[in-house]
Image: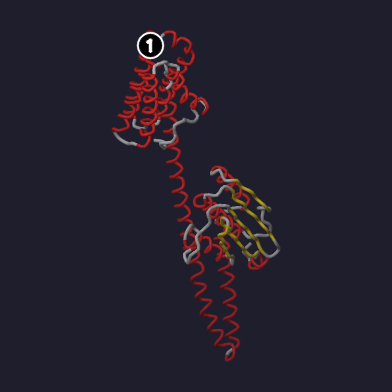
Amino acid sequence: MQNWYHIFSKNTGLSLYAWIIFCLLPFYFILRLSSLFEITVGILMIVLFFTTYRLAFIKKGWTVYVSVGIQMVISIGMTLYFGYVYFALFLAFFIGNIQHKAGFITLYVVHLVTTIAAVSVGFVLQTPLFFPQMPFIVITIIGVILLPFNMYNRNKREKLENELETANERISELLVTEERQRIARDLHDTLGQKLSLIGLKSDLAGKLVEIEPEKAKKELNDIHQTARTALNEVREIVSTMKSIKLKDEVKHISQVLKAAQIEFKLKGNPDLADTPLLVENVLSMCLKEAVTNVVKHSNATNCKVSIVQSPSEVLIRICDNGKGISDGPNLLEGNGLRGMRERLEFVNGHLKVESLEGTLITIQVPKLADQIKREGLS
């Protein structure tokens, strides 16, 4: 069910201006009468119709059907006495929003039968009033027949799409969690034992360096060989990680921001040069998390992303004009900021969050390409 203020339907073949005309027309049909009593009764019927129409959107259960019943009676009365048949379109729109199948079919059949019957009787009783409206009455009958099914199917499709999107998000979260756990296990199994061994041999070499230099030299050679082996194994782990290019992530976030009706501006080149795969992965994930925060929490209308590359570092700034982030000791604990900080610490990066007129997130990562190449990681 849509919100109570959704009086005017969307994508039904009729523009907003047509719906406004249908709201104003009943006053024309009533005010042309000479009797003050008739004008008063007509205005009361209009007020009662729109009151129950709005209440129908916020009520649940049997009260909805009572409200629709009252609206049907008013619509029939307006048709027979005042020659105004267009309340039937409002009812058709509302009935299409009822997702309970039995309720939808029941109200649809009752509304269609009563509308056709009221129009038929109206032609007999007030032919001069109905005949000039013939084309519009025919359109109204067609709308009563087709509009509920159109709205019903569209709302059902939107519901299924939302459920699918939610399921996909959940699957993505599970995949990310599983990937993190896999990487953590691989790193632990690969580096844990070897780093412990390097620590023990370093202590031993420190003790032997003066009393038994030859043994100390042997221990240092073992440390060097163990470190090389560990680096090669880390290289294998990194090579199996899914490559997330920053330029691809920029395209993705532009689509997300567009869907959220947030203006997006990009400054700088997202095609990184001389940047290791692991570092680019981290930058891409942090950028995604930052923009997700903008969409979910900021209430912003625009978001600017600036990418600055220098020989020594990569600097990314994400700025929005939203409500900002409240200051406090737990600032970096929520909204995914803690995870961003932990990722960046892994590649010697830094995260800075400022809340002024909106939020400014600064991501700074040093370029370690030359060092990593020397160590055999690139």
Q: Position of residue 338 (x, y in %)?
A: 50, 62
- What residue is rendered at 65% in x and 55% in y? 306
Q: How is the image coloured?
A: secondary structure
Residue 310 vs 40, above or below: the answer is below
Foreground of the two, 53 or 31: 31
The residue that label 1 is drawn on is 120
- Residue with the most extreme left position: 62
Q: Position of residue 72 (x, y in %)?
A: 35, 23
Which quadrant of the rendered structure holds the C terminus? bottom right
Residue 31 vs 66, above or below: the answer is above
Label 1 packing within 10 angstroms: few (<14), some (14-19), many (20+): few
Foreground of the two, 203 or 22: 22
113 left or right of 31?
left
Foreground of the two, 3 or 344: 3
Q: Position of residue 270 (x, y in %)?
A: 65, 53
Picture quarter containing residue 121?
Answer: top left
Q: Amino acid at mark 1?
A: Ser
Which quadrant of the rendered structure holds the N terminus? top left
- Residue with the most extreme bottom position: 211
242 left or right of 96?
right
- What residue is rendered at 58% in x and 65% in y? 350
SS at badge 1: helix
Residue 31 vs 291, above or below: the answer is above
Q: Position of residue 357 (x, y in %)?
A: 58, 56
Picture quarter containing residue 114?
Answer: top left
Number of disc labels: 1
